[in-house]
């Protein structure tokens, strides 16, 4: 059923299996814990977060009481609970479970391997969202050390992406650009498609712009635009957003003609999608940028549309 995406029948089958295993093996058996874990993962995928949490509470209880339970299984259950709580919006509680999972993982002979890197990434994200920027960076650096040593480029990209968000919040724009550049390198190594790469180029372009490296930013955004055309087409909202960022960078660089060209294309896309309010906000922002760099005529044109 799972392979066909039939979640309801999958859950029904697992529920039947749970009853059979409780009858045959007992309520506190390893087979029951494994079935509870499988059901919880499926419930999480279908948005049944409360039910998933209840199943994981029971799974964790059983695995902790069984003398033959492995720390890996216990860590998996704790990590799963953290994910469910994160999806349910209970970030503080989720962070507590990820922290417990990390303790279990580090007790293993290989200190948990890539599962530890995944846990550290989740903890870094939640620490950042809780406002603990320094703590987030420490966790992410530890994750990167593990992932880079094993050339796990997907996990490296994840950690760098979160690090980029932390540095951006702290207005450390050169560090932000460096993180997103590393994301791009990882994604190119993994041969990711243009949908992924366009986000990397846009993130780099915005960070370079704020770091006052306007020419580099302009180049990156032009690359992002070509990728967006390939991935989404000329009239897609994503392409419009790239035009908006390219317009802002062009105006910062005092290239009014280029900025206006991007702004006109952004306007066409907004009208195509009935997003006049978004275009109005962009006009105000572009006007402010032009005014700040001394292009008062261009600023007036933006403000008077």
Image: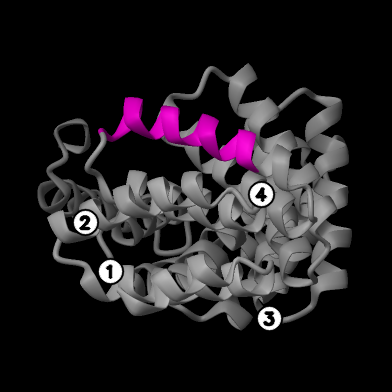
* Cα–Cα span, label 2 and label 4: 39 Å
**Which label's residue is closer to the chain start, 2 or 4?**
2
* Cα–Cα span, label 1 and label 4: 28 Å
* Cα–Cα span, label 1 and label 3: 25 Å
What segment is highlighted magenta in the picture? 218-233
The answer to whether the residues at label 3 and label 2 have Cβ atoms under 8 Å apart is no
For mark 1, what is the residue? Answer: 48
For mark 2, what is the residue? Answer: 15
Q: Secondary structure at mark 3?
A: loop
Provide residue 225's location: percent of width, then percent of height. Answer: 44, 35
Classify residue 51 as left or right of residue 295: left
**Which label's residue is closer to the chain start, 1 or 4?**
1
**Is residue 26 covered in magenta?**
no
* Cα–Cα span, label 1 and label 2: 15 Å
For mark 4, what is the residue? Answer: 161
- Residue sitting at x 78%, y 34%: 147
């Amino acid at each position: 059923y799972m392979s066909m995406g039939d979640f309801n029948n999958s859950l029904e089958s697992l529920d039947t299996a749970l009853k059979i295993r409780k009858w045959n093996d007992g309520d506190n058996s390893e087979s029951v814990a494994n079935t509870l874990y499988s059901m919880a993962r499926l419930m999480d995928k279908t948005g049944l977060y409360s039910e998933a949490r209840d199943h994981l509470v029971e799974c964790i209880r059983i695995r902790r009481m069984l003398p033959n339970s492995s720390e890996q299984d216990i860590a998996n259950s704790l990590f799963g609970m953290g994910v469910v709580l994160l999806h349910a919006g209970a970030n503080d509680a989720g962070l507590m479970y990820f922290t417990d999972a990390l303790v279990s993982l580090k007790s293993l002979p290989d200190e948990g391997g890539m599962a530890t890197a995944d846990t550290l990434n989740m903890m870094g994200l939640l620490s950042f969202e809780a406002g603990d920027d320094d703590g987030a960076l420490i966790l992410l650096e530890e994750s990167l050390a593990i992932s880079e040593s094993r050339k796990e480029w997907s996990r490296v990209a994840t950690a760098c992406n979160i690090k980029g968000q932390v540095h951006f919040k702290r207005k450390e724009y050169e560090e932000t650009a460096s993180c997103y550049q590393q994301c791009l390198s990882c994604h190119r190594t993994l041969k990711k498609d243009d949908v992924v790469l366009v986000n990397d180029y846009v993130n780099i372009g915005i960070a370079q712009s704020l770091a006052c490296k306007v020419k580099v930013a302009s180049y990156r955004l032009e690359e992002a635009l070509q990728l967006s055309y390939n991935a989404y087409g000329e009239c897609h909202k994503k392409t419009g957003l790239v035009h908006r960022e390219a317009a802002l960078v062009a105006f910062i660089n005092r290239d009014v003609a280029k900025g206006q060209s991007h702004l006109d294309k952004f306007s066409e896309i907004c009208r195509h999608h009935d997003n006049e309010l978004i275009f109005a906000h962009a006009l105000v922002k572009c006007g402010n940028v032009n005014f700040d760099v001394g292009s008062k005529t261009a600023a007036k044109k933006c403000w008077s549309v």
